[in-house]
Image (cartoon, helix red, strand yellow):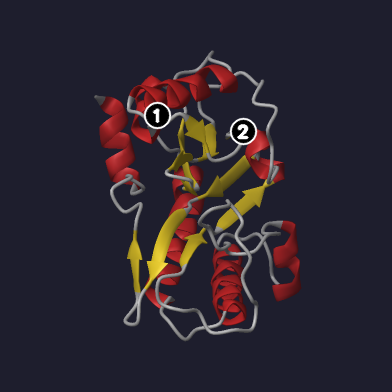
Amino acid sequence: GIEELMKRSKAGLFEYQLESYFDQHIKYHGQKQNSFKTIAATGVNATILHYVFNNTKLQDGELVLFDLGCCTDYYVSDITRTFPVNGKFSKRQAEVYQEVLAVNKKCIAFLKAGITWKEYHEFARGLIIEACKRLGLITEDKEVINYYWHGIGHSIGLDTHDPILYNEPLQAGTVLTVEPGIYISEEKLGIRIEDNVVITEEGCINLSQDIIKEIKDIEEFMKK
């Protein structure tokens, strides 16, 4: 479904028009229900965490962020991918994207049974602080709130936001989201990359690993 969005993306479409290809794709393949109202956010809209208007026209040279999922046998998914409307990242877009992707990968490598949610959140926040400093956005740790203002993820299962205890060790079999983001409103640039993982004793299993997220893979796919 996400690859269908990348394939269909072009300047001039409205966010809701591109969104419709995901809805059609999952229904055609037997999934009747979305997990939640899809976030389809281009340009500065991607800096709004729960943007749901989806009524802005896609512009050449901008990125578009999709936060979406479908429901299967009452279990939900919650995936986010960000990609260029025209299929090619600019130098700055790629720079910010690579920082977010690196945090995503490091968080996935960090997770395992026994770690608390608090430790997970603080680990991710530290990585994003350093990323924002490298990007020239902040000089002090406390300034990160201007570019990252949500938790690193949430528990997921029968509901998109299942309850979880902040200070209790994670148990094997728990399903979580990993969703770092950096949002630069002054540059009309918002990037989030979200995967769903199952916690194991040794680490975690990335359930969404087959959904492309490397820059080279996205650009190569969108050239087809």
Identify the residue under disc 2: 43
Q: Residue at x 56, y 59 (%)?
A: 135
What amino acid is at disc 2?
Gly
Q: Position of residue 49 (x, y in %)?
A: 68, 46
Screen quadrant of the N terminus: top left
| 81 relative to 50 in the view: left or right | left
Q: Residue at x 54, y 31 (%)?
A: 62
Identify the residue under disc 1: 26
Secondary element at tag 2: helix
Screen quadrant of the C terminus: top left
Number of numbered tags placed on the structure image: 2
Residue 111 position by quadrant: bottom left
Secondary element at tag 1: helix
Q: Which is in the foreground here, disc 2 or disc 1?
A: 1
What amino acid is at disc 1?
Ile
Q: Is residue 127 above or below residue 79?
A: below
Give the farthest residue toward the front: 73
| 155 relative to 77 in the view: left or right | right
**Does the residue at mark 2 contact the one at mark 1 (Cβ under 8 Å)?**
no
Q: Nearer the viewer, residue 18 or 57?
A: 18
User: Can residue 105 be seen in this snapshot?
Assistant: no
Q: Is residue 58 above or below residue 149?
A: above
Q: Position of residue 97 (x, y in %)?
A: 47, 50
| 179 relative to 202 in the view: left or right | right
Distance from disc 2 to disc 1, alpha carbons, whole Å, reads: 25 Å
Q: Residue at x 60, y 60 (%)?
A: 162
> Which circle marks residue 38 in the picture?
none
Q: Upstream in the sequence, badge 2 or badge 1?
A: 1
Q: Position of residue 130 (x, y in %)?
A: 57, 71
Give the farthest residue toward the top: 12
Residue density around tag 2, few if under 14, some if 14–19, many if 20 or more, within 10 Å: many
